[in-house]
Amino acid sequence: MIPTSLVSAALLGLLAVVLAQSLLIVGNRFVRRHRQRRRERIAAPVRGPLLQLLCAEEDEQTELLYRLAEIDRRTWVALEPTLTALLGKVAGGAHTALVRLYELRGAAVDAVADLSSRSAARRGRAAQVLGQLCHRPAAPSLCRLLADHDPEVRLAAARALGRCGGPESVPYLLESLHGPRTVPPGAVTMALVSLGPEVQRSVAAGLEHPEPLARAVTIEVLGATGVVSHASEIARALREDPQIEVRIKAARALGRLGMPDGLEPLLAAVRPGGPVALRMVGAGALGSLGAVAATGPLAKLLGDPDPHVAAAAARALLQLGPEGRAALRAAADDRSGGPAAAQARAALAESAVGGARHDVRAEVAL
Amino acid sequence: MAHVLIADDDADIRDLVAFKLTQSGHQVTVVEDGMAALRAARENTVDLALLDIRMPGMSGLDVCRELRAAAETARLPVIMITARSQEGDVEVGFAAGADDYIIKPFSPRELSSRVTAVLNRVER
């Protein structure tokens, strides 16, 4: 039997912890709001000229630029979060004006110094600024930041490298997918795609990476950037990679690339007996590939015992144009067609609804 | 010049758009959420609404649908603002009845031209 006094003491202790945590949360919010208001108050006198700069014609910008570049350090620090946020939200002359303001202020140099700040928020903001400014000399420091102990800083570094990195940043980005301090695969993929076709030779080296996640990301990037010169290596990954996730990415990439080399391995991937997820993605990829030669095999898949594979095949046939639609209509009209006929009818009905939606949209746009 | 309603939960965007449109000679009403946008559109004589698609609570899409559903606001021109990463929203925006859309990051000058173009289209 537990003594009542002990239970009471435990409950009181628990209550004290809950109260302390609540106070901490409220206190934190209060401090953050107070700081925010203080920043807004300090930056208020220069907010007008900043908006004026962003909306000014090019020949009217110079005077405003110099006026803003000369503001005191306290005001600049208070204004900087707004400037950083606006860099990602405006384009054209407004973006150019902001970049020039940062240059005049020597802010890129400050940001590079801030990459080794003790404050994670400052490191993250510095990475963001350097990325937005496309400051290439900062790329090696940003690569090091991919192993930062703060996940937000690692994410900011990956995003920044997507804007200001080069071929030498690619291995670091791929390595950041593994180990105790990782960057989410989506962020690495986005960064590698943003770096564009000129770094894709370095990206392709990732096809031989020992880690499956690195191979999967590599394939996704090559598919998304449309680098057709690696289609045969992606086809080999689809056939031979030991990891199903990599093979699925390879199937999808081959569909996106739309190269004839993709047809055979994709047809092999959708054959009965293979993993359902791969067969489903493979069927979809045959539709994206747009090869009319896939019409027959896809029509056969309409009667597949797995409804997901059959539905993917039906949608893929719609993508193949008149031949695919003819195959769907033939299957739909087959009275003894069973599930295959049902799948075909569903796809044709779905397509009709989609077409009607498209018409409505076009009418609204007019 | 026209009376433009601006609804965006992002203060930087709100201020920037309001500044540019005021500079172009328009009168603006600025709100920071969907409910306030709907109220402002019903209570004022607004010529055009600029709605951010993603707003907490009532989204720009919901506001647009509500505007289209009511007889007095059914013909109010609507321009949607969306982020590049949410370009899929554009199709949904048109389906909800939007007349045009602007993708962030955007140039303030382009935004002003789009507003003028939509207003001219309506006048015709």
Image (cartoon, coloured by chain):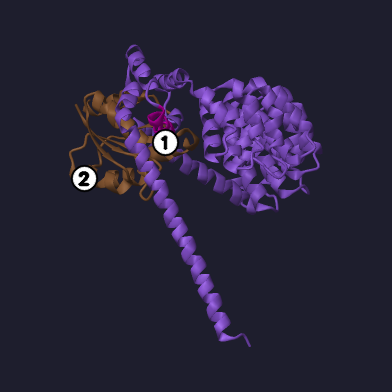
Chain colours: A purple, B brown
Q: Where is residue A188 shown, x and y percent of the image?
A: 63, 35
Residue type marked 2: Arg
Q: Which mark is residue B82?
A: 1
Snapshot quadrant of residue A172 = top right
Who's the residue at 58% across and 24% down the image?
A: A164
Of residues A358 and B52, the one drawn nearer to the viewer in this rendering: B52
Q: Where is residue A65 shown, x and y percent of the image?
A: 37, 18
Residue type marked 1: Thr
- The extreme bottom residue here reads A1
Who's the residue at 54% across and 43% down the image?
A: A348
Snapshot quadrant of residue A251 = top right
Who's the residue at 68% across and 43% down the image?
A: A181
Of residues A172 and A311, the one drawn nearer to the viewer in this rendering: A172
Q: Where is residue A56 shown, x and y percent of the image?
A: 32, 19
- Residue A294, compared with residue B72, is above or below; it is above
Q: Which image quarter is the C terminus of chain A in?
A: top left
Snapshot quadrant of residue B105 = top left
A332 with respect to B28 (left or right) = right
Give neighbour class at mark 1: few <14, some 14-19, many 20+ (Cα, 10 Å).
many
Residue interval drawn in magenta: A73-82
Q: Which image quarter is the N terminus of chain A in?
A: bottom right
Q: Chain of mark 1?
A: B
Who's the residue at 44% across and 17% down the image?
A: A104
| Residue assigned mark 2 | B42
Q: CA distance from mark 1 to mark 2?
A: 23 Å
Residue A171 shows up from this direction? yes
